[in-house]
Image (tube, rainbow, N blue to C red):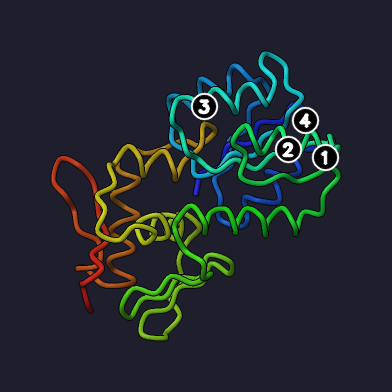
Amino acid sequence: MRLLLIEDDTSLAQGVRTTLKPEGYTVDWLADGRQALFGLENEVFDLVLLDLGLPGMDGLSLLKKIRSQGKDVPVLILTARDAVDDRIAGLDAGADDYLIKPFDITELKARVRALLRRSGGRSQTAIQIGPLEINPQTQQVFLSQVPVSLTRREFALLHELANQPGHVFTRDHLQQLLYGWDDDVESNALEVHVHHLRKKLFTQLIRTIRGVGYLLDKDARP
């Protein structure tokens, strides 16, 4: 899962990134509203963490702009503005949730998980597809009730595919979700992750759609 953190407080941004990365998220960070708008218009993110008081373009204007463009990426506002009118303005502009600074980092993690579940159309924490069970909260995977050990990016790739079984994800989409702007990416990195998942789970689970990308076959069995 790839998150975009838009926050001009450097120490807070570094703290949030340090906390969320071990949870399996790729967290990109921008401190300027206009730069963030460009990033959202040109790249793929699963969730946006948005401060309101930003240079270049304020967070509320940024939010209204991306919603007017039809972008439905979940947005969690992180701000020190705690007045009821400010919360209403943020929600009316298209925010999905609102968290007041200073916040407890465990609450931030829980709200991120809840928004990602909601955006994936799920009410339950775990994803069950045949003999495969995926728990995003604990990052555990079970195949026929036997635990399977995955790396952070292997889990992120499997989770993305399993969120929409049968849907074809392009290679570019998956690579953008797995790697942030600070990462060095080998040209065959995605293929390597797919190979490892097939080896650790079973070959038929992930199908290659030639010239397009990959899908998780919900009817496949070991």
Residue 44: x %, y % from top left: 44, 36
- Give the distance between the C-alpha atoms of the residues marked 4 and 1, in whole angstroms: 27 Å
Sequence-wise first label, 4 or 1: 4
Numbered badge on residue 84:
1
Sequence-wise first label, 2 or 3: 3
Residue 169: x %, y % from top left: 29, 47
Numbered badge on residue 130:
none
- Give the distance between the C-alpha atoms of the residues marked 2 and 3, in whole angstroms: 18 Å
Q: Which residue is mark 4?
A: 10
In this rendering, the answer to whether 189 lies above or below 22 is: above
Mark 3: which secondary structure? helix
Residue 167: x %, y % from top left: 26, 53
Sequence-wise first label, 3 or 4: 4
Mark 1: which secondary structure? helix
Sequence-wise first label, 1 or 3: 3
- Give the distance between the C-alpha atoms of the residues marked 2 and 1, in whole angstroms: 6 Å
- Give the distance between the C-alpha atoms of the residues marked 1 and 3, in whole angstroms: 23 Å
Mark nearest the camera among 1 and 3 is 1
Q: Residue at x 52, y 56 (%)?
A: 118
Mark nearest the camera among 4 and 2 is 2
Amino acid carrying label 1: it is: Val
Q: Which residue is mark 3?
A: 66
Mark 2: which secondary structure? helix
Residue 127: x %, y % from top left: 43, 70
Amino acid carrying label 4: it is: Thr
Q: Which residue is mark 2?
A: 88
Q: Residue at x 45, y 66 (%)?
A: 150
Residues at circles 2 and 1 in contact by the CB criterion of under 8 Å: yes
